[in-house]
Image (cartoon, helix red, strand yellow):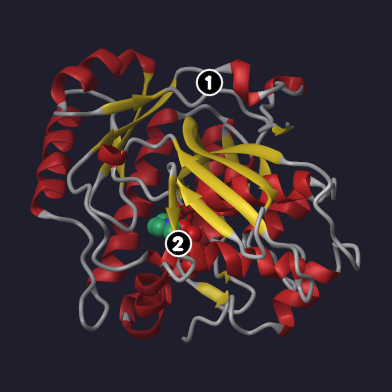
Amino acid sequence: MTDRSLTDPAKPAACFAAHLPARLSVQQPAVAYAPSNIALAKYWGKRDAVLNLPLNSSLSISLADWGSHTRIFPAETAYDEVWLNGVSLPLDSAFASKIICFVDLYRREQTLPLRIETDNTLPTAAGLASSASGFAALTLALDAAFNLKLPKSVLSMLARFGSGSATRSLWHGFVRWDRGEKEDGSDSFARPLMLDWPEFRIAIVPVDTGPKSRSSRDGMNHTVATSPLFKIWPAQAEADCTAVHTALEARDFATLGALSEANALALHATMMAARPALCYLKPQSWRVLEQLWAARAEGHQIYATMDAGANVKLLFLSSEEVFVRRSFANVSVIRPFEWPQSWLGKVGPGGQNWVSKQVL
Ligand code: 2P0
């Protein structure tokens, strides 16, 4: 499968045009924040690479104050400027090109040079990818800068063109991205689950914090194209997503943890069966899993999930936090339902948490 999601202009352009005014102007400098997220039921494989539509639904937990802040201003020159963590990037760098391709989907033929600054709060040592929070924050900031006031469901759909996992980073807490059925992707966006679980914890056990050997997008496309095990993935992944959602609603942590771990291991099995094999996990990842399984055999309710990288994420409730901090080296514990109110804005009704986009 070729990846043309940002280079084949026709279908994405139609999708953006359906929600944008004919002409845009930067109404105001804008700033936005979006959290990163970890999927408990994973997205892996596309049913349409151009529209970046997933083969299966997925469900994630957002990482509170681990995420991306993005600021947008009119550029002072005729050219875009892209800054990452305080450093100005060459426009032909991979990061800047992706950002500019995404912003061009909004601008279409208009000349509207922007200065786009992103600061990630994700600790580099945690080895987490920032594309989910980065594209979600960019989508929110563009909405504010162009004064579009689009509904969150539409923002989630637009963020999908930057990165699939970004669809889920527009809210705090648990978020579900429905794969959708329509060919044009207009029903493929995420929604927050009205579910607070203050005791829920996620921890990152860093194994390899360097750059990935292969991007998730490449790895995903390679797995779909060559792995004989991938045939069973879409149906199993959809069933896992439904079951994870049900376990969450029942606050059944043991079932939720077991399902999430099985779903992640099945994902890695499809990759390992690809030809040639794709193995993101390292010997140290397996050692962490062995340690976790030994702890579980002794009664600790701790489960694991892994993404397109070697790091292991632990899922547990607050009653295990002391044990996890004591047992796993260099672990970072995240409390997904706690974040600094001062800069994240309002908390919505029913305990639902809204990412704010703040206008300067
Ligand atoms: C997920 N991952 O659900 C899965 C699990 C990685 C493993 O979404 O091609 O960067 O930009 O849509 O979102 C990472 O893939 O891929 C991802 P694109 P993305 O979190």
- At numbered mark 1, what does the secondary structure look like: helix, strand or loop? loop
Of marks 1 and 2, the one in the foreground: 2
Percent x, y of residue 359: 75, 33
**First in sequence: mark 1 vs mark 2:** 2
Name the image quarter holding residue 269: bottom left
Residue 199 location in percent, x, y?
Answer: 45, 18
Could you tell me the amino acid type at mark 2? Answer: Phe
> Which residue type does callout 1 highlight?
Trp
Q: Which residue is mark 1?
A: 339
Drawn side of residue 304 relative to residue 297, left or right: right
The residue located at (66%, 27%) in the rendering is 353
At 73% across and 84% down in the image, what residue appears?
A: 10
- Residue farthest toward the right in the current orientation of the protein: 22
Q: Is residue 177 visible?
A: no
Residue under the point 46% across and 86% down: 1
Q: How many marks?
A: 2
Q: Which residue is mark 2?
A: 95
Whether the residue carrying mark 2 lies under 8 Å from ligand 1 is answered with no
Q: How far apart in space, not on screen, are marks 1 and 2 (Cα)?
A: 27 Å
Does residue 44 lie above or below 328 as drawn?
Answer: below
- Crowding at dot 1, Cα within 10 Å, few <14 / some 14-19 / many 20+, comes out as some
Question: How many other residues sit within 10 Å of disc 2, few (<14), some (14-19) or many (≥20)?
Answer: some
Q: Is residue 44 above or below residue 37?
A: below
Q: Find residue 347 and report its horizontal and vertical position in percent.
A: 70, 21
Image coordinates of residue 122 in percent, x first then y, are 39, 37
